[in-house]
Amino acid sequence: MSLISRRLRRGAQVLAAALVAGVLVVPVQAAPATAAIGGLTWQDEFNAPAGTPVDQSKWRFDVGGHGWGNNERQYYTNSTSNAVHDGQGNLVITARRENPNNYQCHYGRCEYTSARLLTAATFTQAYGRFEARIKIPRGQGIWPAFWMLGNNFNSVGWPASGEIDIMENVGREPNTVHGTIHGPGYSGGGGIGGSRTIGQPLADAFHTYRVDWEPNIIRWYLDGVEFFRVDPGRLGGNRWVFDHPFFMIMNVAVGGNWPGYPDGSTQFPQQMLVDYVRVYSYVPDGNTGTTRIRGQQSGRCIDIPSSNPYDGAPLQIWDCNTTAAQAWTFAADGTVRAMGKCMDPAWAGTANGTEVNLVTCNGNPAQRFTLNAAGDLVNLNANRCVDVRENNPNNGGRLQLWDCAGTPNQKWSRA
């Protein structure tokens, strides 16, 4: 069992434009500043076959039924009954009204099971963008969350470790998402946060929840629209503890001091579907810069032929040079750009052999790539690698998508 208990939560709800712990939380009115966000550093796309358990190289489980500091009613398991891939590109966390193994909770025999996943042992990061696309569950007493704790939790305890709640919802407020921080002097019911309420229940569709976290400011977004931000000036003289690595947590709680408890209207099972979780780096001063992308096999760089950036221009490798045709930017939205346009798999294709072209940036997820630590330039939509066709190391070798194989014609580096 993890030592991580989710402390006693809000006695009073944390709302935008409300006084919380003596601090005025003001809803965002102006257009948000662009955060200094760099390339993708961690991801889980959940593209595993149906029935497959979570990837334990990325996620571990909290297990137990001691209430987690909030008088919650569920027992968290590590079973595929409560956390499993659905084969349709989602992780499914399921809260059930059941107790098949006679689990014991803080109040006696447990009534519910659910799951809580965390990256404490596998991944931590300070600053950057933390984002997930989620379809939340619904119902009185249901409490889904995507949140983070400081990696020094076990040494300094909570709330000195800090907590960033990226997304929380309580079933009695079906249209409202909450975002909150907790630290010394502003924890539990005194957490500092904001919320956004939309015109339909959040459980009706997938939504994107994220924070952009930089030194001395954190911003919250729902579907790309900022709804709250906080900085040290909001803490009333209390200490800002968001200056060290944090780990991520996803869970569905059943009951608790804040959401209340299930009643006759609550239907089970309840499921939270997670399409992806992605983390991006923080780049000081927003200087993402331009770079050449050099192939390991050829020593040549990804190039726009004849420096002509027409829509559909097939990308190639060519002797590395300092022209704009090889000056690529890994943008904050996951696109890879040169000469004002984006790297793009032809017709948003995902199959092996799809040509990699240059096209006007259009917001299509097919235009999102990441250069990972292993040197793979991965198209996130296809989950395939940029590959030099037919292992051609010569000038003019064309690029395509292909299953990632770790071969030299798929290895790239910034140059």
Image: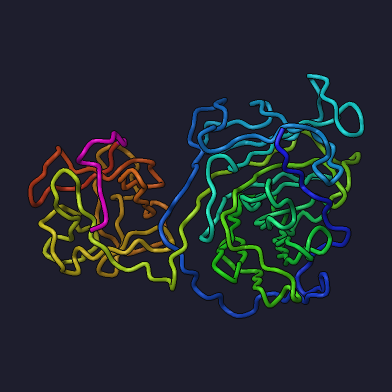
The quarter of the displayed image where residue 243 is located: bottom right
Whether residue 127 appears in this view of the structure is yes
The location of residue 255, given as percent across then percent down, is: 84, 43
Vertical comparison of 169 with 90: above or below: below
Horizontal side, residue 314 vs residue 156: left or right: left
Number of numbered tags placed on the structure image: 0
Q: Residue furthest left?
A: 394
Residue at coordinates 87% horizontally, 41% vertically from top-left? 262
Residue at coordinates 81% horizontally, 58% vertically from top-left? 188
The location of residue 332, given as percent across then percent down, is: 43, 63
Quadrant in which the C terminus is drawn: bottom left
Horizontal side, residue 270 vs residue 371: left or right: right
The location of residue 28, given as percent across then percent down, is: 65, 75
Residue at coordinates 85% horizontally, 37% vertically from top-left? 73
In-front residue for pair 286/275: 286
- What's drawn in magenta, residue-wise? 403-415
Horizontal side, residue 191 vs residue 229: left or right: right
